[in-house]
Structure formats: structure tokens, C-alpha cells
């Protein structure tokens, strides 16, 4: 038998509750950014499809 010092059993540190909350907030933030990108792309596509309005008619005074 070898005489080695016993090490503490390796365990995963318990993550604090705020970690789960932070992960959720990060996921929501990413989803909101992605949603904003999609909405901006849709708005740009609609703007390209819409012809420019005609110039205003001039009236004679």
C-alpha cells in the first residue's frame, strides 16, 4: 500500500441561484436582439418594396 495523502472528494461547486437567473436574462436578451434584427430587416424590405411618394403638386397663386 502506498502512503498518499487523501484528497477531498471532487464535487461540482453548487452554482448560486443568481447564476440561473443571469443565464435566463442572457437568453432573453439574446432573443430580444434577434427579434429586433428580424423586425428591422422586415422594415427595410417593406421600405424597398414601397415606391417613393409623388412630389407635392404645385399650386398657382
Image (cartoon, rainbow, N blue to C red):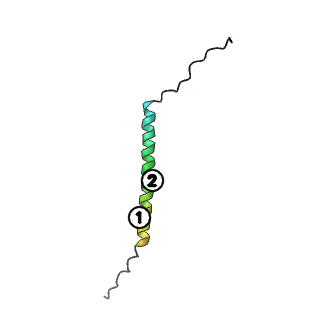
Question: For the residues marked 1 and 2, what is the alpha-carbon distance in whole angstroms?
Answer: 14 Å
Between 35 and 7, the one lying in front of the other is: 7
Q: Position of residue 59 (x, y in %)?
A: 32, 86
Q: Position of residue 57 (x, y in %)?
A: 34, 83
Q: Which residue is mark 2?
A: 34
Q: In the rendered view of the protein, which quadrant contains the C terminus? A: bottom left
Give the residue furthest to the left.
Answer: 61
Q: Which residue is mark 1?
A: 43
Assign a secondary structure to mark 1. Answer: helix
Question: How many C-alpha atoms fall within 10 Å of the one at disc 1: few (<14), some, or many (≥20)?
Answer: few
Q: State left or right for residue 44 relative to residue 12.
A: left
Q: State left or right for residue 13 relative to residue 35.
A: right
Looking at the image, which residue is at 41% across and 64% down? 43
Query: Residue 41, located in which quarter of the rendered image?
Result: bottom left
Q: Pointer 1 and pointer 2: residues touching (CB < 8 Å)?
A: no
Query: Residue 45, located in which quarter of the rendered image?
Result: bottom left
Seen in the picture, residue 43 relative to 25 is either above or below; the reply is below
Amino acid at each position: 500500500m502506498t502512503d498518499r495523502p487523501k484528497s477531498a472528494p471532487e464535487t461540482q461547486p453548487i452554482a448560486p441561484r443568481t447564476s440561473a437567473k443571469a443565464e435566463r436574462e442572457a437568453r432573453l436578451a439574446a432573443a430580444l436582439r434577434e427579434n429586433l434584427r428580424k423586425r428591422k430587416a422586415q422594415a427595410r424590405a417593406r421600405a424597398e418594396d414601397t415606391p417613393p411618394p409623388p412630389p407635392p403638386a404645385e399650386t398657382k397663386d
